[in-house]
């Protein structure tokens, strides 16, 4: 079983609080995924998507906070940066979470993607692999949100935080050796070679389970890496996960 947390680019100003918040969240999220009740549910149901992880995310944020009185909100509708002074005429975006931590309000967007732990990461025509495409979109989504529209309800200091969570899986009957840590490093190498998000990539967390979780694959068509090659039995192994954190804006 392997795990690690690393700081990439800590930035300026509130970097200690940023690191503390992200590292605490990753640890609490890891704890939640390791609970017997969580793993039993996944085994008996299927590999989770973003909505099915929502409860674990909320529990992890609550446990991350230092004070039980600190506030959390979900699914906030906030105006976008469209240079319109009339709020009623502004286009509206949505943020997954607002989490108060110490003296900072974090505006957080989360994306979850499943990645094959055995197959190569394939690039798009422009050489940007589709596995990091959601990461770029979530950063753009946060950058489009207007902080002015929520500053009266938030704490004095605000941060926009994108959390990209990758779940590493492979077919039960695959004869290829699964290496989720290698896949984690491959994703980083693609990010470093792209101007899409590299300058905003600040923290990374990786966890490989001691034993993979055997569960059912999702039935719907997927844009994720090579999941169309999953075996016909519908069973896959869930090996572990990564969390990549980007400070946006």
Image (tube, rainbow, N blue to C red):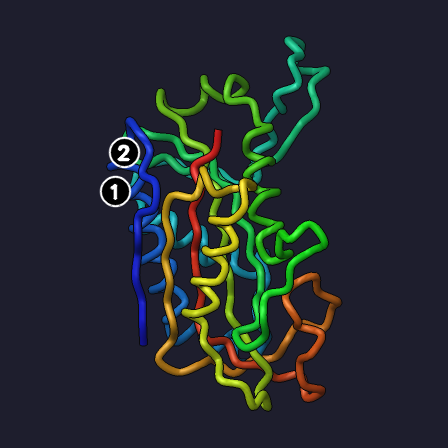
Q: Quick one: SS at disc 1?
A: loop
Q: Residue at x 52, y 54 (%)?
A: 190
Residue beneath disc 1: 66
Q: Nearer the viewer, residue 229 or 148?
A: 229
- Residue 96 visible? The answer is no
Q: Which of 178 and 150 is in front in this view?
A: 178
Answer above or below: position of 233 versus 6.
Answer: below
Q: Do the residues labelled 2 and 1 touch (CB within 8 Å)?
A: yes
Residue beneath disc 2: 102
- Residue 247 visible? The answer is yes
Residue at the outermost top position: 85
Answer above or below: position of 75 versus 214.
Answer: above
How many badges with numbers are in the image? 2
Answer few, some or many: residues within 10 Å of disc 1's Cα (few below 14, many 20 plus, some between 14 and 19).
Answer: few
In which quadrant of the rendered view does residue 90 lie? top right
Answer few, some or many: residues within 10 Å of disc 2's Cα (few below 14, many 20 plus, some between 14 and 19).
Answer: few
Answer above or below: position of 110 versus 80.
Answer: below
User: Residue 159: where, in percent of width, then height?
Assistant: 41, 31
In which quadrant of the rendered view does residue 206 lie? bottom left
Instruction: Name the quadrant of the N terminus.
Output: bottom left
User: Residue 28: where, in percent of width, then height?
Assistant: 33, 57
Q: Residue at x 55, y 56 (%)?
A: 112
Residue at the outermost right position: 221
Q: Which of 146 and 100 is in front in this view?
A: 146
Q: Which residue is drawn at 38% across and 72% down?
A: 208
Q: How far apart are marks 2 and 1 (CA)?
A: 7 Å
């Amino acid at each position: 079983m392997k795990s690690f947390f690393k700081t990439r680019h800590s930035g300026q100003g509130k970097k200690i609080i940023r690191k503390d918040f992200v590292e605490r969240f990753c640890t609490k999220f890891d704890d939640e995924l390791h609970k017997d009740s969580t793993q039993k549910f996944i085994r008996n149901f299927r590999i989770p998507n973003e909505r099915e992880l929502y409860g674990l995310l909320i529990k992890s944020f609550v446990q991350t906070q230092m004070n039980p009185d600190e506030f959390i909100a979900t699914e906030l509708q906030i105006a976008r940066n469209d240079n319109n002074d009339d709020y009623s005429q502004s286009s509206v975006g949505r943020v997954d979470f607002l989490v108060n931590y110490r003296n900072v309000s974090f505006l957080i967007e989360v994306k979850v993607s499943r990645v094959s732990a055995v197959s190569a990461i394939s690039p798009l025509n422009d050489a940007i692999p589709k596995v990091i495409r959601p990461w770029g979109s979530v950063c753009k989504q946060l950058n489009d949100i207007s902080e002015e529209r929520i500053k009266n309800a938030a704490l004095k200091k605000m941060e926009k935080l994108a959390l990209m969570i990758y779940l590493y899986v492979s077919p039960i009957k695959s004869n290829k050796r699964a290496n989720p840590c290698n896949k984690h490093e491959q994703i980083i190498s693609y990010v470093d070679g792209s101007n899409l998000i590299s300058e905003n990539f600040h923290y990374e967390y990786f966890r490989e389970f001691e034993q993979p979780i055997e569960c059912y694959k999702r039935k719907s068509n997927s844009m994720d890496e090579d999941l169309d090659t999953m075996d016909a039995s519908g069973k896959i192994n869930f090996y572990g996960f990564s969390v990549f954190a980007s400070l946006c804006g």
